[in-house]
Image (cartoon, rainbow, N blue to C red):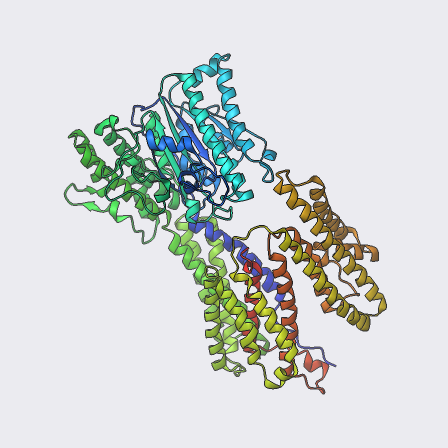
Amino acid sequence: MPPPPKSRYSVPKLLILGLVFHFVYIGTVFDCYFTSPVVHGMKSHSVGHAVSKRLVLIVGDGLRADLLFNEDAFPTIPHAPKVVAPYLKSIAETRGAFGISHTRVPTESRPGHVAIIGMENQPNFDSVFNQSSHTFSFGSPDILPMFARGAIPGKVETWCYNEEDEDFTKDATFLDIWVFDRLKELFQNATNNITLNTQLRSHKVIFFLHLLGLDTTGHSYRPHSREYLNNIQVVDNIVRQTENLINEFYHDKETSFIFTADHGMSVIGNHGDGDLDNTRTPLIAWGRGIRGPLPDSVPSSHDSYSKPWGLGHLFRRDVEQADLAALMASLIGIDWPVNSVGVLPDIDPSRPGYLSPKLGDESLAQMAFVNAKVSSITLLYEQVFVFLKVILEQYTTKHELKRAQAFFYKPFVTLEGLNTISDQSFRLANLTNIERLIQAKDWHASRLASAELIRISLNGLHYLQTYDRFLIRGMVTFAYIGWAAYTSLYIFRPLDFAKTPEASGTVFVHLSAAVALIGFWTLFALQHAPFMFYVYVAFPCYFWHQFLQQEMAWLRVPPRVDYWKLLVGTSMTLIVIQAMVVGYTHRFIWSIGFIFTGIVWPVSWPSRILKQNLPLVAVWGLLCLSAGVFPVLPVAKKESLITILVGGCLILLCGGFSALWVLHEVERLKGKKSRQALTALFLIQATLVVTTMIITASSVKGLQAKQGLPLPNRVLGWTVLGISFTLVANGRTRLLKILQAVSPVLAFASGGPYHTAFSKFLAYFLGFGPCFVILSISVEGLFYVTYSFLLATWVVSESIVRNGRFPVPANESDHERTKVYSFQPDDLRIALFFLFFVQVGFFGTGK
């Protein structure tokens, strides 16, 4: 018998290439959206005088604005106070300025602190700490060291607790109390340390208190919990004690205070995205140089969000988070951080800022002018950083150099356009105009002009920062479309049907691909583009080269596909894929998908197959409808130990009934010895599920009692995984093969001669069962059972439908059965079902 024909398409090659391609193209996301605009070598600018001698910055990590300001912020908690933070609230009402500090994505601790203290969401930055005479900082080891590393040695001193103290299972108020205790010790030590006392009493000193407790508490217990309420009260008390401690030590009332947060927190205790609860953080400023409360404006500065604050009679002044660096620099008279993109709130003369009116219009105008100069110079250096990688002092030199190196370069016209009146660029003309207004003592006009120049400069920064996005997006688009075209070759397999691998038009394809690749590489070399650009462009060139080359051979093959059906199927595919995209934000789409697959799909079966398999159709429909319930359940689930244990019991119950049928089939196909081995395997896995249920119940009780995660629970959980990896690496005996069942990881390793297809499936199901007990907080275990049996039923249904539609003739030879697979339009539906089930597996319960 002749050997079966060998396909020219290697699936392992496709998988490896796809893995490398997607891994490399992750970098395009960072090159497009997260390239650092930080540049170095710029000249510092300062107003030249200080409003206050020192500054105290207190950051309540993870504090939501509404839960600090709202009256009756915790209505579901019995006996909760009407005002959670009375001291901070009284400051806002009687002697300070307040508002919301709006953060930007990512709403995480490190980017938030960088925005407050230095530059928005960027590493390796200049900061107000670095510009201060001395900074004393207290708090988390995750935040403080990054400011000390970038500062002049010895200028920024840090006191950090141990990383192990950041325990999400215990009372986190300890962390905040620790911070204040270290501050108190610092002042106590100054009485016996002349050097320290001198440093503390010098001007331009900053004290930074990072209070992490709220973030830890919010993650552990969620923001609307009693624990979060108690932590806010602890923070409020620390603020009061800190102000008293400062006043008792200095006795001069020359201290400015700023209280804010790095980010907020969603209702389920998460942050990082653009949810409004994550981006709205409180801001309260008071002390030397800060204005007092003002009557509300007309129209009102308040909206529905701040109406429950009980501060509607006072003016609310919102800022961007990056503006705080400019405010702090102005208060203590230090050089503005050269990378700052913040705008001093007081620049806009149309509404009050945060600085005291006693400063006068002249001082505010000078500050506005300095702010404008900083933003403009940052813009100029940003242009060189992005495109030329060269630090140059003069803008014109950089601009001309960029013009000479960039093909079809388009400068930012709003700043680089020619002012016909002064025969200067708009940038220089605006700076000259501001200087003239200040010399003429037209402070109001100079502040307006400075604010406008800052706005334009920030637009220019964004323009230059995103200048390469069009090119990157173009490469990404052509690469992924090319990848889709390339993978289609493994479906249609044109070379397997072509008589000759080469067609007449392939020479043109080879030449075009080579010219495109060399052309792009040459362009990148002339423009000093990043190295990864050379790699990025190679993928679309290769994909399209392979696709067009093989399509030439395909065109010479008689058509074997009904193209009309293929066109209709492709259109439906695009519609379904777009529906899945909508499902990410409108979860009911997944439920509609389950209804379609459970009811509409069986109707399309041939009537003969449908009538012969009515019980299977009923089970399939019931499972689909059951699975469709989970996507419409609330995403913000509350912990329910009962539901978790019910899920574990259901895993055991369904696994037990399935084992009865599976073991019977194993004995029939593999023999009695195989049945005995798998019986032991399934019993060990069931025992593991029971063990994890006991561990979970114990852990929940320990966490609810704020006793932390019990040590035996930790040891048991990690020991199971440790033993499993050891067995994978070293075990080959029959005993070890059975013991491999002690871990979900080892469910994959427990194969061998004992298994049938469904016994493997059951081993995987029971093997991963403990994960869905340990990691669940609610109905995840119930979803796992429904989802697993739905997949098993899908495999059986597809087999019956495919064999019923395309039966194998009884007289077909083995050689004919091993022919190269030919694409069928129904494969598109199977692929869509697979994609749908994968997405539901990730997002079916909101995780």
The quadrant the N terminus occupies is: bottom right
Q: Considering depth in this image, is 182 or 782 the residue closer to the camera?
A: 782
Q: Determine whether, in the image, residue 1 is placed left or right of residue 622.
A: right
Where's residue 830, x and y in %?
A: 57, 72
Between residues 239 and 550, which one lies in front from this camera angle? 239
Front-lying residue, 363 or 841: 841
Which residue is rendered at x = 16% and y = 45% of the image?
420
Q: Is residue 335 visible?
A: no
- Tell whether 97 sits left or right of 539: left
Image position, residue 360 (x, y; %): 23, 27
Asked whether residue 686 is in view, the answer is: yes
Quadrant of residue 313 in the image?
top left
Check the image and report above or below for 513 versus 462.
below
Depth order, front residue of 556/842: 842
Instruction: Kindly indicate the quadrant of the structure image that contains residue 836.
Output: bottom right
Position of 516 relative to 115 (above/below): below
How many numbered callouts?
A: 0
Tell which residue pokes out farthest to the bottom in this image: 811
